[in-house]
Image (cartoon, helix red, strand yellow):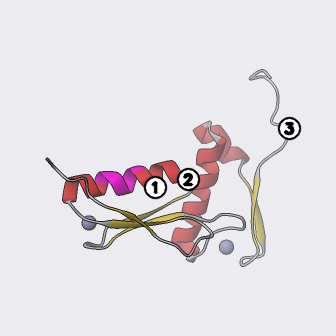
């Protein structure tokens, strides 16, 4: 693969609730990263419509002690957010994976 190749498959996102489909090509050009473009699109869509596009399920990190909470489309940043918040605030968080009913508890580290 070379950078001169045209993108053969334009990534698209569809939402059955909106009955719409979007191409992410220009966002790809903008951000030069497909996953980020999809993630950003999904988060923007949720912010504006209250729901996620099809086939997008977030990791949800929520603090049990304060209003802090974020949604992520990947485990690693969700986990990092939860651990970081716990470490800096001493708060306990819940981390809910996509398609799971079970919350994982993220507890603050115990300082020696
Ligand atoms: Zn929608
Ligand atoms: Zn907190």
Observer-nearest of 54 and 79: 79
Seen at 56% across and 70% down, the residue is 46
SS of the residue at dot 3? loop
Seen at 13% across and 47% down, the residue is 112
Q: Which numbered disc, 2 or 3, marks the residue closer to the eye? A: 2
Image coordinates for residue 89, horizontal then vertical, percent: 20, 59
Image coordinates for residue 75, horizontal then vertical, percent: 52, 53
Q: Which mark is residue 8?
A: 3
Q: Which numbered disc, 3 or 1, marks the residue closer to the eye? A: 1
Q: Which mark is residue 74?
A: 2
Between discs 3 and 1, the one toward the N terminus: 3
Quadrant in which ligand 2 is drawn = bottom left
Q: Is residue 30 above or below residue 64?
A: above
Q: Residues within 10 Å of mark 2 (few under 14, many from 20)?
A: some
Look at the image and say whether residue 82 sits in the magenta stretch.
yes
Question: Which quadrant holds the N terminus?
Answer: top right
Q: Are marks 1 and 2 in contact (CB under 8 Å)?
A: yes
Count of picture labels: 3
SS of the residue at dot 1? helix
Q: Which residues are magenta?
A: 80-84
Q: CA distance from mark 2 to mark 3?
A: 25 Å
Quarter assignment of residue 23: bottom right
């Amino acid at each position: 693969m070379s950078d001169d190749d045209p993108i053969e498959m334009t990534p698209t996102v569809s939402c059955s609730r909106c009955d719409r489909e979007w191409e992410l090509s220009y966002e790809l050009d903008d951000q030069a990263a497909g996953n980020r473009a999809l993630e950003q699109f999904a988060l923007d869509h949720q912010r504006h419509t209250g729901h996620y596009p099809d086939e997008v399920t977030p990791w949800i990190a929520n603090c049990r002690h304060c209003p802090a909470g974020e949604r992520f489309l990947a485990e690693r940043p969700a986990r990092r957010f939860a651990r970081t918040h716990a470490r800096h605030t001493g708060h306990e968080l819940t981390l809910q994976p996509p398609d799971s009913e079970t919350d994982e508890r993220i507890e603050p580290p115990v300082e020696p």
